[in-house]
Image (spheres, rainbow, N blue to C red):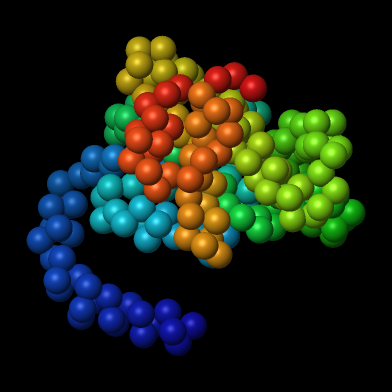
Amino acid sequence: MQKLVEGIHQFRHDIFSSKQELFETLVEGQQPLALFITCSDSRIDPSLLTQTEPGELFILRNAGNIVPPYGAVDGGEAATIEYAVSVLGVKDIVLCGHSHCGAMRGLLDQPQLEKLPAVRSWLGHAESTQRIIEENYEHLTDEKARLTATVEENVLVQLENLRTHPSVAAALGRKALNLHGWVYKFETGQVFGYHPEDGQFVPMEGSSIASSSATQELPAI
């Protein structure tokens, strides 16, 4: 806890003072560039990853970067998505999974969730991911490769869930919104974007790849 308190003091005296004008303008409101949906995992920092300033990302985080289908639960996810699209008018939604995801590991190994009923229930919104891996990836016996495939497939599944939200569906229908599927490999710093033409996740270092993955709509799963 001491580290957090010291961090507050450092922020106030070093960071805030150097960007005070920016923070003062944020009093007038926010116009974020994108809604960024990712995992609660402490190893991923959306603003650090994208090198964005306060006010530029509207962030939604939960275990496993899961988006329950519209109407499935009365939770904060639906409200956050609706507000970002209908009120803030974001033009892009990024759904970002990450390597070594504990939630996805739990999805693959259900017995370890025996004493975690809330987690088990929450991961029910990723049941399609589990079925896809079980039925379509039997050839993957390596644990690491299987987890990587689970992380990637879950991003695509959750993007499809995102489409069930009325605000998202309406914005997509009038071509006012783009959806993006990313996977962050935190041990190397790489980000992989889903590339519809190739049907796979590819590194986003190249500007042409990044542009292509950002502007093309994801196909239905």
At 28% from the left and 81% from the top, the residue drawn is 10
At 65% from the left and 45% from the top, the residue drawn is 151
Judged left or right of residue 41, residue 147 is right
- Quadrant position of residue 121: top right
At 15% from the left and 66% from the top, the residue drawn is 19
Any part of residue 189 in sight: yes
At 37% from the left and 61% from the top, the residue drawn is 48
Quarter of the image for the C terminus: give it. top right
Q: Residue 171: horizontal and vertical position, in percent?
A: 38, 19
Q: Residue 81: horizontal and vertical position, in percent?
A: 45, 34
Q: Residue 34, relative to residue 144: is it above or below? A: above
Judged left or right of residue 103, residue 175 is left
36 or 12, which lies in front?
A: 36
Instruction: Spot the residue most to the left.
Output: 21
130 or 145, which lies in front?
A: 145
User: How many numbered discs, if any?
Assistant: 0
100 or 212, which lies in front?
A: 212
Any part of residue 40 in sight: no
- Quadrant position of residue 74: top right
Instruction: Spot the residue most to the top.
Output: 173
Q: Residue 146: horizontal and vertical position, in percent?
A: 76, 47
Q: Residue 174, relative to residue 12: is it above or below? A: above
50 or 54, which lies in front?
A: 50
Q: Residue 92: horizontal and vertical position, in percent?
A: 37, 33
